[in-house]
Image (spheres, helix red, strand yellow):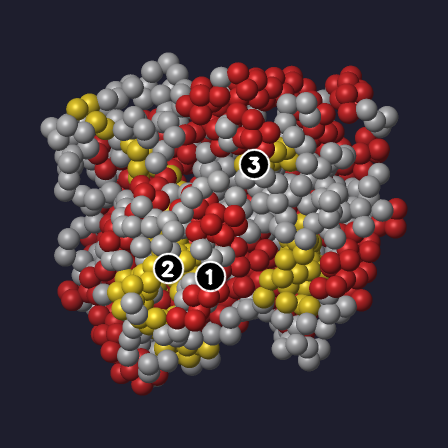
Amino acid sequence: MSIAQRPTQPLDASGRGAAFHSSGGGEELGIVEPLIFDASRPGRRAVRFPFASAEARRAAEGQPGLPSSARRTQPARLPEVSELDLLRHFNRLAHLNYAIDLNFYPLGSCTMKYNPKVNEWAARLPGFADSHPLDPDQLAQGSLALEWLLAELLKEISGFSAVSLQPAAGAQGELTGLLMTRAYHRSRGEGEQRSKVLVPDSAHGTNPATASMVGYTAVTIPSNERGGMDLEALRAALGPDSAALMITNPSTLGIFEDQIDQVIAAVRDAGAIAYMDGANLNAILGRFRPGEAGFDVMHFNLHKTFSTPHGGGGPGAGPVGVGERLAPFLPVPLPVLVEGDADEVRANAWAGRSTPDAHFALDWDRPHSIGKVRMYTGNFGMFVRAYTYIRSNGASGLREISDDAVLAANYLRVGLADAYDLPYDRICKHEVVFSGRRQKRDHGVTTLDMAKAILDAGVHPPTIYFPLIVEEALMIEPTETESLETLDRFIEVMHDVARRAADDPESVKRSPVSTPVGRLDEASAARRPDLRHVFGQGGE
Amino acid sequence: MASYPTDLHYSKDHEWVRVDGSTATIGITSYAAQELGDVVFVELPEVGAALQQFATFGVVESVKAVSDLFAPVSGEVTQVNEALRDTPEHINTDPFGAGWVAKLTLTDSSGLDELMDADAYAELTA
Amino acid sequence: MAYSPHTDADRERMLATVGVGSVDDLFADIPAAVRPARFEIPPPLVEQQVRAELARLAEHNRVPQVSFLGAGAYRHLIPSVVWEVIGRSEFSTSYTPYQPEVSQGTLQSIYEFQSLICELTGMEVATASHYDGATATAEAALMACRLTRRQRIAVSGAVNPQIRHVLATYCSGPGIEIVEVPADLAEGGSGLTPAEAAARVLDDDFACLISQQPNFFGVIEPMAELAAAAHATGALLVAVVEPVSLALLEPPGSYEADIVAAEGQPLGIPLAYGGPYVGLMAARMSAVRQMPGRLVGGTHDAEGRRGYVLTLQAREQHIRREKAASNICTNQALCALAATAYLSAVGPEGLREVAELSTVQARHVAAAIEGGGLGERRFTAPYFSEVALRVPEAARRYAALVAQGIVPGYPLWRVYPDLADTLLLAATELTSDADIERLVDALGATR
């Protein structure tokens, strides 16, 4: 069956491709945008490179050539396209995407806030973009200074005494945190004994998965009826075999753990490490500093709280902050100030001045370090953006971020309370979790159906079916960057969907009808995986 | 309340057993199949493997969920349902027939006493 | 503040709706005992000020005028059209494609990426990408352990030391033992990993042998022989490759590699002091259920339209939790998009031109230094686009050149005590004849 030879139809006004073609086999298949391979024609080029000079070729002749046995015999069938065809292909693909820069994106637990454009300007400055990660420290003083300053800011924001920027994403920050936890217990001769990591039932899946990667057993702690941690269950589970508690605070229910001081005390009394998953830091800037409150370690998600773009699923960045107990075990290398006074360097930088005699270096000499978790010093481009963002906001701006994010979430909580069940009806932080169980029970309309109906209203739906402890969950995080008009419009959309679920459930189950493709057959995709283009079936 | 084939034995882990002499055929129930949703993959045991009653012997995956399979009885695997490799959807479409998972030689038929009949299982899943 | 749309009137209206008197009331559940004593962040900056601050820091980097530094990260031309594609904010400001109906742009581009990586490597399945080449290699090693149910790993000493460092960290989690297969670093040695050395280490406890092509010294490894040595004991071959080299070198699928891992930075991603980059991983279809990380698959909707979804998700942490193949959550979608646009822009001919020009200029620089009596090749085996040269008093000369803004490669003695006075020099298509002339002149002046 050939799909590549069929012409493409233009998208209709709704954005959905109207392509329908009968193939010889009698099966109907529509292609919204062909693959880049389908546009390939032998001999087309987008980019050319210069020829080696005669001098270079002559010089090279005296050197050993590539052994013929190691040579590739068939060239890779990469696309052969003109620059314009290439650009149009990717621009058309861009049109098929939803994005923050297009509209509201209230995905709970993802913090889809606006990504300021000056951050992008900064990341592309040639001094940063062209800096080689193995350049000697003396040529990379700007990069090292930025890393050091960002770590200083993250320390102040979180109340921790040291920060490593290295982890590439939140999940890798968790891995780093638990490896340090294990190194700490080993250093005290308790490495074998402490084998369990306690995780609340509302946790992200990465928490238990990370525990397993480090060789720990994850133990689930139930939530109480108020959506907080069951303190008695926690105390009962804590013991000489506990390595750590991993807690997301505010939780994935959007609830701040109002017994957090007692939780931390219980964990520390048991000799375990208190790990805070910082995924929801956007709710508490200036209001709660985990390190100061007694946590031992936390990862930051720069792509959430600090506005670096999500990029369709990465790159992220997941720095970790630690208190004194874990600081010796941080990954290597660590950017350090080796010459100059730290207070003076900071004060100068905050005033936009350089400190003439300051010198930064990478410190590899950390004998207790867990090692490296990724190449070089981390996702540097994200550090530039996060630093730009924190400096743009300043102390007052950071506070305002959390204040407005929490206010917006509570506004939606109240605005939608009559349309959907609210399992935990109390003040929330950055997000609010509703349940679609009423719609499912009364009208047979699932949360998935309603999510698809929200798409038809031109808005991205909330996170669905998470956290796992809420039936038919709808998890809504508006962030601080959405205007009141946008929030009101979203409330209208959600009410409308709830009304339709009651009055015309079939129309909700049929949605979406306005998107480039309808609901896709995920079962077929998983049963008979089609994970790459197979050449020779099309026109190329 | 759903009804289930009366000639089978059922475990609380939602597996069923059909006993024919010393041979036991095992699979997962229609209730479990519906809870999982569209089954996309079944990790089958190896022929010759010795299964212990109520111990895991395989995995079943749907689009959005994954579940261990627990042996409803003890026995040695004599045959597995190869058809599930290409068409795991049999588990959804015909869980008590074409969706069977494995055949065993029963090593301890007393284990059947620990299972439910159709009525008791219907009660459990009501 | 700059990015908040709310006026005071908006906030008043919201507070009234919520039914609280002030925003502070929304934080009343934070116990008094743990409220912050301080929050000393510098005051906000407007765009003009923040630009000045970032420009100030960027100017403190002295990007070298001439550099032969590679060692795992390479300066290549990034075509303007690649920048244009990744600058589209429909790609950069979208989330992980959990709602496929409105994420076909991201999903299809990842499907194209997976297809391109399969084609380049000669493998059957590629993931949607990993954090970087080192974590992809570490995840490949853990995957080999799951596939073989073995707990030891052999790794060539000629694999990038930073990759081995990350591998050691990852393996320390589940307690997997790593054994090094020594490369031939003797005086007059080849610089490659002899298959006999691998065979001496391997036995039927080993899950895999990891070797790199071209290896860290730029030398072409006998990958088919190394694969055979691994397979003889039931171990897998994990091939760490450099993607541009695959324009000229045999793809890992041809020499029977079982898993391929690579750093994708050379494919249109800026150096950016080390990241974000993109890790590539590819394998055989038979191993797909043990692969870590996201995969995109083709399917169709009810009306028969072709579309793409995240698939085989039951492997992943958000479903399998503590039993997941990995804790990996994000991939590096935007960097994978850059690689997709890059490979499409250069095409098969362009990639070959980049690789050939790089190999010619590497030979040019080696010949110029040898011809000038300034140094000699340290290894006998053929090399790709990086070459190890022994330069007398290399440490002194390295420092002298760096002070002039010339980076004469990577100082190998810092990581390999056997390689005293040895510099690893990389060339790419951006290495000009004038760069080589300047290097030779500057080295000569340090005599």
Reading the chain from its start, which is encountered first: label 1 or label 2? Answer: 2
CB under 8 Å between callouts 1 and 2? yes
A214 in relation to B11, above or below: below
**Image position of C362 (left or right of C333):** left
Name the residue tied to disc 3.
A472
Hey, what amino acid is under mark 2?
Answer: Val
Point out the frontmost of discs 3 and 2.
Answer: 2
Q: Residues within 10 Å of mark 2 (few under 14, many from 20)?
A: many
* Residue B115: assigned label: 1
Co-location on one chain, circles 3 and 2: no
Separation of disc 1 and disc 2 at Cα?
A: 9 Å
The foreground one among C43 and C89 is C89
The image shows residue C114 at horizontal and vertical percentages of 32, 47
Separation of disc 3 and disc 1 at Cα?
A: 32 Å
Residue at screen point 57% across, 18% down: A499
Question: Chain letter of disc 3?
Answer: A
Residue at screen point 30% across, 37% down: C299
A173 in relation to C113, above or below: below
The image shows residue C263 at horizontal and vertical percentages of 39, 56
Co-location on one chain, circles 1 and 2: yes
Separation of disc 3 and disc 2 at Cα?
A: 33 Å
Name the residue tied to disc 2.
B17
In the picture as drawn, the residue positioned furthest to the bottom comes out as C200
Hey, what amino acid is under mark 3?
Answer: Glu
Q: Residues within 10 Å of mark 1 (few under 14, many from 20)?
A: many
Label 3's element? loop
